[in-house]
Amino acid sequence: MKELSLNVLDLAQNSLSAGARHITIEICESEEKDSLHIRIVDDGAGMDPDFLKRVTDPFVTTRTTRPVGMGIPLIKMAAEMADGQFSIQSRKGEGTELNASFRLSHVDRMPIGDIAGTVTTLIQGAPEVDFIYIRRTDSGSFEFDTGQIRGLMEGISLREPEVLAWIREYIAQGEAGVMAQEV
Ligand SMILES: Nc1ncnc2c1ncn2[C@@H]1O[C@H](COP(=O)(O)OP(=O)(O)OP(=O)(O)O)[C@@H](O)[C@H]1O
Ligand SMILES: [Mg+2]
């Protein structure tokens, strides 16, 4: 995986598999603090304490098509490679929260990639789920919430290609608005 956005896609897909109805993806990027932080919170089925302890091990998975699960071990490795940390909290029946931090300027820090594309892909696969995407930088924050968009769409499915294209563009513009000015 060359981009963190693909990791985020995999992790949010774990949340969907766990039956989450609300998934929050938050990305905080600070040049001042030289840090990047990714947080994913869901209200899915959660994991029991024994499973949770082992979940960063690639051989732990409930998938049945192949024996090795990679989503969580990969983000942990990506964070640790870039001087950061990874943690996961979960409660059975309540949900899961994942946190990964990175040193922004670290040579091995993977690029963030196309989060607008990731969020759009997630919505396309699960238009009934509420996705909240928050992007914070030193210059401000942008927040996207499918709950609000659904209200505006007056019954039109978020899965319609025109709607998805609009969402993607809306997120990309919102992100651009809080990114540092290039010199
Ligand atoms: N948000 C979550 N809520 C509940 N269970 C989770 C969550 N994230 C991961 N899990 C559990 O942890 C296991 C490991 O997840 P991981 O993403 O590392 O691998 P995988 O999803 O099994 O396989 P892959 O991501 O490679 O397709 C999952 O099979 C699932 O049982
Ligand atoms: Mg996974």
Image (cartoon, helix red, strand yellow):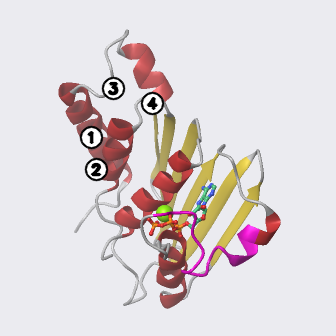
Relative to 174, residue 7 above or below = below
In reply to whether residue 41 is colored magenta, the answer given is: no
Residue at coordinates 67% horizontally, 72% vertically from top-left? 87
| Residues tagged 2 and 1 counted as in contact (Cβ below 8 A) | yes
Which quadrant would the C terminus be assigned to in this image?
A: bottom left
Question: Would you name the residue on which mark 2 appears?
Answer: 117
Question: Would you name the residue on which mark 3 appears?
Answer: 158
Numbered-mark total? 4
Residue at coordinates 73% horizontally, 69% vertically from top-left? 51
Amino acid beneath label 2 = Gly
- Dominant SS in magenta: loop
| Residues tagged 2 and 3 counted as in contact (Cβ below 8 A) | no
Where does the magenta region start and end? 51-64
Query: Secondary structure beneath disc 3?
Result: loop
Q: Earlier in the sequence, mark 4 or mark 2?
A: 2
Amino acid beneath label 4 = Thr
